[in-house]
Image: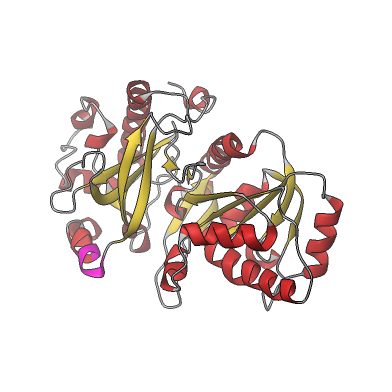
Amino acid sequence: MDYRNYLQLRPYKQEKEEKKKILSERIRELTCLHMEKCPEYKKMMRVSNFAEEGGNEAFVKLMSYEDIPFLPVRLFKEMELRSVSQNEIVKIMTSSGTTGQSVSKIYLDRETAANQQKVLVKIVSDFTGGSRMPMLIIDCPSVIKDRHMFSARGAGILGFSVLGRDKIYALRDGDMSLDVEAVMQFLEKHQEEKILLFGFTFMVWKYFYIELQKWKKRGLCFDLSKGILIHGGGWKKLLNESVSSVEFKAKLKEICGITHVHDYYGMAEQTGCIYMECEYGCLHTSVFSDVIVRNPKDFSVCDIGESGIIEVVSSIPQSYPGHCLLTEDIGRILGEDDCPCGRKGKYFRIEGRLKSAEVRGCSDTYEVFAG
């Protein structure tokens, strides 16, 4: 299938067999492309006995993307992996990382960046509707200043901003304090409309919810009952503070009346193909991507309900070999094609991160790749 036609598909309408067929075809195409254009990737495939010297015949006969060798996601922190020339790169994305940590660098050409945007809009619009809403971004403006090279945080803001209009930032540059006057003016202006809010989970909690609490004690309340909040990332910090997803939603409803809250799972290494949380608290794959849960002992595919390491598969990456990546997250598939929300595809739950020793073990499996 021509990928331009692929992008016209509705994200949650294809049943298991049809999705597997078209996604497998696309993943085989990408594998072929990256083996041809990225020498490091081709070496990895040969090391894994996937591609033999002299040709790409080995993968042509494969039945499913489940059989395509994956790369550990942390390789993008250790190697420069791209399938386009330097002058074709229009954007370099970096993953989030604490001080002193290495970060992933993801090289995007114009077509890959455009496809990321198109897929993101199709996925999120299924949850928010087709019309653009006034948008409150729970962050500060400076995070997107460098458009050529920016973090997953900046990329997320720019990506989701396409879904909004009359956008404002809720936080001030510098001290990340809540811009109360700007937020109040925004809410007054759009008091009869649905509002889209976007932010990263920990920042929503620390710089928005906590501040709303303080202002409520002073007698100032914010009405966000018509709002739809989309948030993602940063759960580790909240769990360290003993804040669960259930409490997160309950506290926000209590403080500002918001009831439509959707978490999402995604990463810089596969921007665009995010996994949105439905009304029943399940994360969903779309026709543009999939999740495979693998047994940490032998990397075999786990059955539904079994916990294992999450592998993410995306139809988008053309400028870098990021179409099949083994993450450092633990999760399990809850079901497929039968979520009560009505969306087709696998639905799943993230249960935590691999322990450091287990992460090292996974990387050691591929240490020869970087050699």
> Which quadrant: the C terminus?
bottom left
Image vertical order of residue 272 relative to residue 77, above or below: above
Front-most of 271 and 195? 195
Residue 308 percent coordinates (x, y): 24, 51
Q: Residue at image x 42%, y 68%?
A: 239
Left-right relation of 221 to 189: left
Q: Which residues are magenta?
A: 355-359
Q: Main secondary structure of the magenta part?
A: helix
Colouring scheme, one of rainbow, by chain, secondary structure, one colour:
secondary structure
Which part of the image, by quadrant, shows the N terminus? Answer: top left
Residue 164 is situated, as x and y percent measured from the top left of the image, at 71, 46
Most foreground residue, 326 or 337: 337
With respect to residue 258, does 305 lie above or below?
Answer: above
Do we see residue 151 in this rendering?
no
Q: Decide whether residue 309 is among the magenta residues.
A: no
Q: How many marks?
A: 0
Tell me what residue is drawn at x 18 percent, y 58 percent. 368
Toward the viewer: 255 or 130? 255
Pinpoint residue 298: horizontal percent, then vertical percent: 13, 49
342 to 121, vertically: above or below: above
| In-image side of 354 versus 207 (left or right) | left
Q: Position of residue 349 (x, y in %)?
A: 37, 48
- Image height check: is 100 above or below 11? below
